[in-house]
Each structure stands twice: as structure tokens, then as C-alpha cells.
Amino acid sequence: ARLERDTADQVAEVLIDLFETTASEQGPETEGRTVEDLLRLHTEEVLEGLAGRPAVQARMGLILGIVHRAHSHFAESRKLLRSALEQRLALAGWNDEESLEIYHELATLEASSGNPAHGQRMLRHSLDLYRALLGTRHESIAICLEDLAGSLPPASKERARLLEEALDLRQELEPVPGIGTASSLNALGLARMEEHRFDEALDLFRRSFALVKRDLGEDHPFSLAVQTNLAVTLTQLNRFDEAQALERRLVETSRRIYGPDSAIVANALNNLGASLAAAGRWQEAEATFGESLALARRWLPPGHSTLDNTARNLAYVVEYQGRTSEALALLEGLTADGPSDPASRASTEAQLAALRLHAGEVEAAVEVLERLSRRLESSETLRGVAAAAQAERLLGEAYLVDGRYREAERVFRRTLGSAVEVYGPQHPLSAYSACGLASALAGQRRTEEARALFADCLGLYSAWGWADPVTVATYRGFAAGLGDS
């Protein structure tokens, strides 16, 4: 314990020296740089300066690896963590908590941004290593369970079981519930939200927030994260007034704590914009997304998930207001900006194809969507992502517009079955596929089947704030051909 404390103290001293050095070097070359820029600039220099202190160098490699991962510098993070692990293993071997900590960070990095299947195997091994070293009733075991759960598909039964196990363990370790229990409640709430069990998610987030507020206050970063999850869940429950009131408060709190110009404010604005869009308030959503995107472009590297997501959201609401060419320009600029997460890039490609379809470029859209659907289906790591279902739904819509009704029927039957399984029959995405199937049946003159389906789904889909007006018009056109209005 003494050695660990001394090592941590030495790391702290190095960090202090780093910031004192950068502060004394202020000038034209450093003015306006973020802490991220300065750390990136000095990473190699700092580690070289610790060459004679391997324990401190390994710890610093872990810390810098975590920092680079947080800023989407995945290759640099991976290099730092691998080097730190090699150093620490040479010093202490595998029966050492710090060795396992570095290995676990490397596993979570692989699972989230490298090779997800390999990362998941590493996380399982990490859990086994921690159990062998610390036993089964330890805080680190709960963390391992939650991180392993995070690497599994949202609908996975094992994912829910692991999170429930982590919560039970945290409650056992904390007779008076504290931050550990709050963390597990929040993680389980996210799983329930992904399962579209929103009432349960809301209860879990509220319980988590009560503990975080008591122990850390309303303005702590963890508290803000849990409140954000609360607001998103309220939006999913169509409780838009409550959601937007909370999200506006979170925007103002983030501005007060982090300043008006930060990536955290950009994320808060993006969440508010999504709630406004879901409520059908597209002009307000456009202004909010635009402000968020401007901040994200200043503070986040090209390809960052928040930047990409905000740009796509802005493109949606711009298109929904009839400005397809502007939306196309936004997304074409996004794909040219730089590399991004494969799932995020797939979402952008699918949305671009939808815009081209709605602009009348039917043949090109079909070709892109067929190719994208095949690629996602054949990828072990991307098969279950939201972009895969999005691409397939859009392919069905493209077949409809192209008059290929039997192919559209086949696609929409498949997407409808998947949507009902994941979201339930009354979710707008289930209604989207049901309307597509009804349109395909109408195109084949199977009138009674089509009419019955439209009666159940067209109103539900049309009322959804995120429903594309062009798609709604397409579906209404097929329904009108049956004599329905």
C-alpha cells in the first residue's frame, strides 16, 4: 500500500510539473490550446523523462492512455496502454491489481473502438483474473461485470443478468447505499432504456440520482450524466415538457460550470435538440442542433461520435423542413471530415442514401443501400447495430419507390419482426416497418391485408416527431390508393 501511495504521489508531481511547464511556455504557439492539445504535445516527452522510474512510468502511461481514449485518440491510447501493461507485468506480474487495472482499460478500449469481439473476450478474461486475485465480493468485480455487460448486444439476456449481478454485489458491499450503488442503478437503467422498458429505466435513474445528489450534489459530472439519462427517458415516454425543462436546466448548468464554449455544452444542446425534434418542433431543434454542432466542431476531433450524431440530427430536421440539398451538403461534408467509428459512419451512409432517394436518385440509393446492408450483415461487429436495421428499413423504402413490391415486402416483413421483438408493436419504428409492409402489399393489390395494416400503424408513425415527411407522404399515397385517407 505504501508503494502504491508513493507511486501515485510521484505521478501527481509529474502532472503538476507538466502543467507548470506548459503555463510558463504560453505564447503564440500554445495560446488557445486545450489541455488535450498540451497532453498530446508532451506525452512522449513526459514518458521519456520517467525512464528511470518504471513504476511511475507505467502509471503515467495508464493515465495518459485513459486521457487519449476520452478524446477519441484510440491508436495513441492503445499504444500507451500496451506499453504500460508490458512495464507493469515486468515489475509485478499478473498477481497485481495495477497490472489488472491496465489490462482492463485495454480490454474496454478494444471492446469499444477496436475489435469488439476480441475486446469482449479480454473483458471476460479480466473478470476471471480479478476473481482469482480478489475473490468474488469486491468493488472491482462489480466494475468488471458492468464493463463486460456494456460490450454485449442491448437485447442480450446475459447483459441484463450481469448488470443485475453487479447491482446486487454493490448493494451487498454498501449496507448504506452510496455512489457504487448509484453507478449500478444508472448502468441497469441504461440497459432497461435500450430494452425500451422506459418506466423501469425512469425509476432506476431516479433512484440513482437521489444517491448521487445526496453524496456529490446536483452539479457533479456524474450527477449531470444521470440527469441527462432521466431527460432522455422522459423524451422516450413522450413527456416532452418535463424532458425539455430538465434539459434546458442541464444546458445552463453545464454553461455555468464548464463555460459557454465547451464540448460538454455541445452534448447538452444536442440532447435538448433531440427532445425538441421528437416533439415535432423542428425549427427550434434546428437552431439548437446548429449551436451544438458549432461547439462540437471547435472542441471535438473529426469523426467523434458526438459531432457525427449532432450533424446527422441537424441534417434530419433540415430535410424535414424541405431543404434536402442543405441536408445533403451537411452529411457529405461529414464523410469528408475524417475517420469515424464504423457504426457511426454506417449511420451517415444510410442517411445520405435516404436523402438521395428522397431527391429522386432512386437507382443510386438502391445500389448504396444494398451494398451497405450486405456489408453490415456480413460484419461480426456491426450486424446488430442500429445502423444495420436503419439501412434495411431504408432499402425496403427504396424498393417501394422503385416499384419492386415483392422485394419490399420481404425486407419489411423481416424488419417488422425485428422491431416488434426489440421495441414492441406500438413503437414508431415498428409502425414504420408495418406501414412499409402495408405499402408493399398495396402495390401488389392485396387490398384487404394492406388496409388492415394501415389502420393499425399509419396514425402512429405519422404522429412521431422523427417521422420523415417524405416517407409519411409515400405511405399516405399507398393508403389513399386503397380508398383510405
Image (cartoon, rainbow, N blue to C red):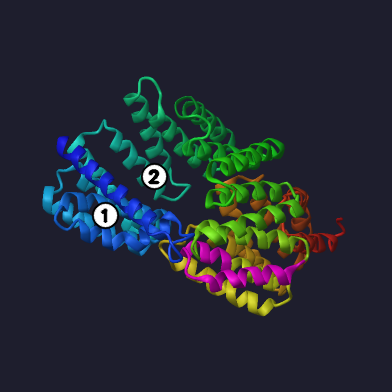
Q: Which residue is mark 1?
A: 61
- Tell me what residue is drawn at x 73 percent, y 64 percent: 319
Q: Is residue 66 above or below residue 390?
A: above
Where residue 378 is drawn, which disc sits there?
A: none
10 Å crowding of disc 1: few (<14), some (14-19), many (20+) = many
The quadrant of the rendering that contains the C terminus is bottom right
Tell me if residue 266 is in the magenta stretch: no
**Label 2 belongs to which residue?**
149
Left or right relative to 301: residue 356:
right
**Secondary structure of the residue carrying numbered label 1:** helix
Kindly identify the amino acid type of the residue bearing the numbered disc 2. Answer: Ala
Position of 198 with respect to 480 (left or right) is left
**Magenta stretch: dominant SS?**
helix
Q: Can the viewer see residue 424 in this picture?
A: yes
| Residue 197 visible in the picture | no
**Residue 399 in picture, x, y percent from top left:** 67, 71
Q: Residue furthest top?
A: 176
From the viewer's perspective, is the residue at label 2 or at label 1 nearer? 1
Q: Which residues are magenta?
A: 323-349
Quarter of the image with the N terminus is: top left
First in sequence: mark 2 or mark 1? 1
> Pointer 2: residues within 10 angstroms few (<14), some, or many (20+)?
many
Label pair 2/1, CB-CB below 8 angstroms: no
Give the residue type at disc 1: Gly
Q: Where residue 358 sits: x, y (%)?
A: 72, 70
